[in-house]
């Protein structure tokens, strides 16, 4: 790819790519169905290097001649290859085997990404590509505007080619002619503009497609689209590389690299998001918003509906916008001039007995369905029997959002209730942006946050403007969102770069406005933020950009807030303008530090910031190590052998460094020094469990005093990394995931302060609890039978709503276990009222007076003289549920079946009625019918991912029984569904792989000192 002066045919054909010819008799037929829109993901696309098609002309100036030639029937070129749409140029090249030994499946393996030449070396032209498709279009009669009114303007209807997002510049040619984006044509007032470049990564671009609606049958459409990389791509490195990438008008800054990810070689050039065609009559309805202006004591809600109406025709159109929901309706008469696009607002709509939308921690995230129709009328009544000229359907939630500001920061309220915000920072689903239209991927990742008890996601400003599928998942699952615009202190002046960047403010602001309009309909969007760590606010964001952002949010999303920066500076912090005066830390802390005020936080002069008042903490980060099976997917044998056992006394393997290894050997070695990678990984999971449980418990013990929000940096990662992710890019949870879940899921939670060893009860719910009791029991993990060493019962207690009862009582180390003994106790806390256990929490601890040292637990795992406890696992119950789930491509539907298993895990006593406790027990769901793929080592990965498991890394005492819930999903192609049969008495799973149905699923339990055991279920039609 680097060596040829142009991308010659031989370069690609040698990799197995077959040049395609589109045109003539073979074409895809695109049927525009009931929704009057169709994805082009299933159309046949080819990608062609512009460099090879310019025929010796100046490659940049040759775009027009190439585009006209390419967008005509019969075009072919030997340098063209099958394209991936939606997808980036890099994704297409990887799919075609352009880079020897590197493809889409292994691009993240070891340092394969480094084997792809970076744009900083090749130059932008090498990544400048044409994407071409040819298809026949037909409009299904079920499309409500398939027979639009015939006027003197357009005899029939209108067809548009839509790019929901591109990167970074785009020129479009259709049937031999250049086409300008519709919004530019509208600004000009119609006519033709010739070739016009669309610019910006976060902007929807639509292009009018010439169609003769008077003709019967299908019509051929040929599209050629030229995609050009960002002009300022910069050199790769940490924190946005050399920072030049921030010069672009709206761009994903981590594309140039960060301290947790390598740079993306093409900077994500291409049609990375949905491409579609849509048909309409003379009008288009778009970008709705349902604003909840008030909720009355009676339960009624007052709503305000708004949406945009665009007239594509050359005639004035008048009529009523009629909006209907299950429980109310409203209408508004408007007149719209030719070529006009304007917002229509219908205020003061009463919704009786409203069912509110809540974040999942406080209630059900109920969604209503709305339908808007434009019915043609004149002021004195309807004409043509009230012809429907346009329709729009969308879901919406009824919820109010308010906030308070005090000296510590902001407190957010939903429906009048204070919400303690716990969550994570979100980057993107994938470094190559492969899941931009994938409903199931977005659902899985947002669901992971919900399963951890998180009720908020911050979409970080160095990443992307998240896609509608993400927000649909958040709406549905009840997870609030903070969406940031695309600036960072790292690249926009504070620490590097320039305060004036981006250079093209107009492009940036057009992208910002379009993003606001695209996602404002989503009730989960809690507030907007102008950028990451911007400071000083007099310079960043640039004043003209800030004023426009404030104007746009006030005008088009007035029921939401715009904050100026996630973090400014403690010297002049203003909680009205910024979320926090300081953020961090970003490393592994000892357990007691997490229970201090502002744990691990230091001023720039290296003095502790323990007295700094921080209410809303947008970033606190720590370490991350994927599970052993996930590490096998991106680490080779040599790197696995060279795991960092001797850090800091020995250099870290280059592959570990390439994947951004952040050391915490103290936490790992606390369980005894590992001798192989598998042991290292298990120890790392246990260390992460305690690290993230302690992190969230330490902050929530200070709920409202002064903490109102705590967001982890980061909760997910777009590639396999050793920094900041609670589940990995394969959707496998880490020990940190289960630690966060242990801390955050219960609405009322009992916990132990690991600095002063006092008990606290945290009530994050709007309910008051009375007559609560806490039992504290300690068990010796190093003795057979795990004898009980202490038992305390505390209470009764009253805990008001949204409050913390702390410093209840300190617990003490048992007298019969001396400080010098290498004992490890399991402390189990249970919170209960008179009838029900409300929460259980457990801690493993060595002596309180010494740094935590669990190395004696290694004896349970590694000493052959210590008997291993045996586990018995049984599937007690099962459930099946099927629900409609929109397909990723947007065409038709798939159906997702939820499979739920109730699993019992029990330790089996020996003949003397004793055994050791099973420590660190974890649950894995496996598809034992066939393997999804192979690791680099050749071992199969049969894990079912994602799967939702209620607990892992827990302890089962001798003779004790634990119940765990396991849930997973299957996509189906029909509503017929599948039934789940649990083999309750089956002790053996299939020993040979099978394909098709029935599929056998194994729930596996293993642990620190136990051998794996399985119980199986099977899926049958």
Image (cartoon, grey):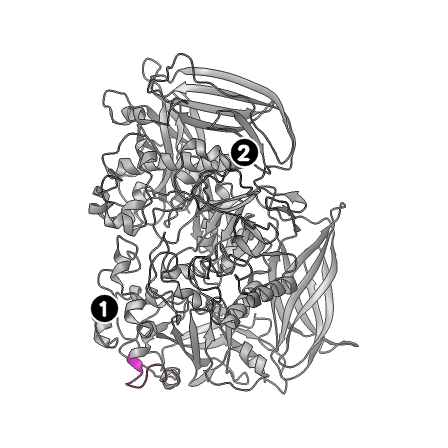
- Residue sitting at 36 percent across and 66 percent down? 234
Q: Given this view, does label 2 or label 1 mark the residue nearer the observer?
A: 2
Task: Find disc 1 in the rendering and name its residue.
Answer: 16
Identify the main secondary structure in magenta. Answer: loop
Q: Above or below — where is 704 with respect to 102? A: above
> For residue 1009, what is the image quadrant?
top left
Q: Secondary structure at mark 2?
A: loop
Q: How many marks?
A: 2
Circles 2 and 1 in contact, beta carbons < 8 Å: no
**Residue nearest the observer in this picture, 474 or 774:** 774
54 is within the stretch colored magenta = yes
- Please say whether residue 934 is visible from this viewpoint: no
Q: Percent position (x, y) of residue 121?
A: 28, 68
Task: Locate residue 543 relative to residue 294 in the image: left or right.
Answer: left
Mark linked to residue 3: none
Task: Find disc 2 in the rendering and name its residue.
Answer: 701
- Please say whether residue 596 is visible from this viewpoint: yes
Residue density around tag 1, few if under 14, some if 14–19, many if 20 or more, within 10 Å: few
Residue density around tag 2, few if under 14, some if 14–19, many if 20 or more, within 10 Å: many
Residue sticking out furthest to the front: 605
The stretch of residues the image draws in magenta is 52-61
Q: Percent position (x, y) of residue 672?
A: 28, 29
Q: Earlier in the sequence, mark 2 or mark 1?
A: 1
Q: Percent position (x, y) of residue 964?
A: 44, 33
475 is within the stretch colored magenta = no
**Residue nearest the observer in this picture, 669 or 598:** 598
**Residue nearest the observer in this picture, 106 or 555:** 555
Task: Locate residue 988 relative to residue 473 in the image: left or right.
Answer: left
Q: CA distance from mark 2 to mark 1?
A: 60 Å
Q: Quadrant of the N terminus?
A: bottom left
């Amino acid at each position: 790819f680097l060596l040829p002066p142009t991308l010659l045919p031989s370069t690609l054909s040698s990799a197995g790519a077959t040049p395609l010819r589109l045109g003539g008799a073979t074409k895809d037929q695109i049927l525009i169905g009931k929704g009057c829109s169709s994805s082009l993901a299933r159309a046949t696309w080819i990608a062609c290097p512009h460099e090879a098609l310019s025929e010796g002309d100046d490659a940049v100036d040759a775009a027009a001649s190439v585009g006209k030639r390419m967008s005509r029937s019969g075009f072919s070129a030997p340098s063209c290859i099958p394209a991936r749409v939606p997808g980036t140029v890099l994704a297409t090249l990887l799919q075609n085997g352009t880079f020897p030994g590197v493809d889409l499946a292994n691009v993240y393996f070891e340092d394969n990404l480094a084997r792809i030449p970076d744009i900083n070396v090749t130059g932008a032209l090498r990544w400048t590509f044409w994407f071409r498709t040819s298809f026949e279009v037909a409009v299904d009669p079920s499309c409500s505007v398939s027979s639009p009114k015939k006027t003197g303007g357009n005899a029939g209807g209108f067809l548009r080619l839509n790019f929901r997002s591109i990167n970074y510049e785009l020129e479009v040619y259709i049937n031999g002619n250049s086409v300008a984006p519709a919004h530019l044509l509208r600004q000009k007032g119609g006519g033709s503009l010739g070739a016009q470049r669309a610019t910006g990564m976060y902007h929807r671009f639509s292009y009018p497609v010439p169609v003769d609606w008077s003709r019967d049958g299908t019509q051929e459409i040929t599209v050629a689209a030229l995609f050009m990389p960002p002009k300022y791509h910069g050199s790769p490195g940490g924190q946005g590389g050399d920072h030049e990438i921030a010069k672009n008008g709206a761009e994903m800054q981590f594309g140039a690299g960060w301290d947790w990810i390598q740079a993306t070689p093409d900077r994500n050039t291409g049609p990375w998001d949905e491409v579609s065609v849509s048909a309409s009559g003379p009008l288009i309805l778009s970008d709705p918003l349902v604003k909840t202006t008030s909720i009355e004591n009676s339960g009624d809600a007052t709503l305000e509906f708004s949406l945009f109406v665009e007239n594509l025709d050359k005639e004035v159109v008048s009529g009523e916008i009629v909006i209907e929901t299950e429980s109310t309706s409203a209408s508004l008469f408007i007149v719209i001039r030719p070529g006009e696009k304007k917002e229509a607002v219908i205020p003061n709509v009463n919704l009786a007995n409203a069912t509110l939308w809540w974040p999942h921690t406080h209630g059900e995230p109920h969604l209503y369905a709305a339908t808007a129709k434009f019915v043609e009328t004149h002021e004195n009544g309807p004409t043509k029997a009230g012809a429907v000229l346009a329709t729009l359907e969308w879901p919406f939630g009824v919820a109010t959002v308010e906030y308070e500001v005090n000296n510590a920061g902001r407190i957010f309220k939903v429906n009048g209730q204070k919400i303690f915000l716990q969550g994570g920072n979100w980057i993107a689903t994938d470094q190559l942006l492969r899941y931009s239209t994938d409903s199931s991927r977005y659902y899985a990742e947002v669901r992971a946050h919900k399963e951890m008890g998180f009720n908020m996601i911050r979409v970080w400003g160095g990443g992307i403007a998240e896609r509608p599928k993400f927000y649909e998942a958040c709406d549905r699952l009840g997870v609030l969102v903070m969406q940031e615009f695309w600036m960072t202190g790292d690249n926009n002046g504070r620490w590097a770069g320039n305060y004036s960047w981006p250079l093209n403010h107009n492009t940036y602001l057009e992208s910002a406005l379009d993003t606001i309009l695209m996602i404002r309909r989503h009730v989960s969007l809690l507030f907007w933020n102008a950028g990451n760590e911007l400071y000083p606010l007099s310079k960043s964001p640039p004043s003209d950009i800030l004023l426009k952002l404030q104007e746009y949010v006030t005008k088009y999303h007035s029921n939401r807030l715009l904050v100026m920066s996630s973090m400014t500076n403690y010297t002049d912090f203003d909680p009205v303008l910024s979320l926090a005066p300081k953020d961090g830390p970003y490393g592994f802390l000892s357990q007691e530090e997490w229970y201090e005020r502002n744990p691990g936080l230091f001023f720039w002069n290296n003095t502790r910031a323990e007295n700094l008042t921080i209410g809303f903490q947008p970033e606190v980060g720590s370490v991350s190590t994927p599970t052993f099976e996930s590490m096998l997917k991106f680490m080779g044998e040599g790197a696995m052998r060279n795991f960092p056992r001797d850090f800091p006394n020995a250099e870290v393997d280059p592959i570990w460094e390439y994947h951004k290894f952040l050391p915490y050997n103290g936490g790992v070695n606390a369980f005894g020094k590992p001798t192989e990678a598998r042991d290292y990984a298990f120890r790392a999971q246990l260390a992460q469990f305690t690290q993230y449980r302690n992190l969230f418990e330490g902050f929530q013990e200070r709920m409202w005093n002064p903490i109102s929000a705590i967001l982890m940096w980061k909760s997910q990662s777009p590639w396999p990394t050793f920094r900041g992710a609670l589940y990995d890019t394969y959707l496998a949870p880490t020990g940190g995931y289960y630690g966060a879940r242990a801390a955050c899921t219960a609405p009322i939670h009992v916990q132990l302060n690991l600095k002063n060893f006092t008990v606290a009860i945290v009530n994050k719910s709007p309910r008051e609890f009375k007559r609560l009791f806490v039992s504290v029991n300690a068990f010796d993990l190093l003795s057979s039978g795990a004898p009980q060493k202490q038992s305390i019962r505390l209470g009764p207690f009253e805990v008001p709503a949204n409050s913390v009862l702390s410093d209840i009582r300190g617990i003490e180390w048992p007298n019969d276990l001396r400080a010098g003994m290498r004992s490890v106790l399991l402390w189990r806390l249970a919170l209960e009222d008179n009838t029900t256990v409300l929460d259980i929490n457990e801690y493993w601890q060595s002596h309180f007076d010494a740094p935590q040292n669990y190395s004696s637990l290694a004896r349970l795992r590694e000493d052959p003289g210590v008997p291993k406890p045996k586990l018995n696992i049984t599937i007690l119950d099962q459930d099946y549920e099927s629900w409609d789930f929109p397909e990723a491509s947007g065409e038709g539907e798939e159906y997702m079946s939820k499979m739920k298993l109730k699993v019992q895990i029990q330790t089996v006593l020996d003949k003397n009625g004793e055994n050791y406790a099973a420590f660190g027990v974890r649950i894995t769901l496996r598809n034992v019918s066939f393997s999804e793929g192979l690791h680099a080592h050749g071992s199969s990965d049969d894990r079912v991912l994602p799967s939702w498991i209620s607990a892992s890394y827990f302890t089962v005492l001798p003779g004790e029984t634990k119940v765990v819930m396991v849930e997973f999903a299957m996509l189906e192609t029909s509503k017929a569904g599948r039934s789940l049969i649990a083999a309750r008495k089956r002790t053996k799973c299939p020993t040979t792989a099978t394909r098709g149905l029935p599929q056998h699923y194994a729930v596996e339990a293993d642990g620190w000192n136990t051998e794996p055991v399985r119980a199986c279920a099977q899926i049958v039609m």
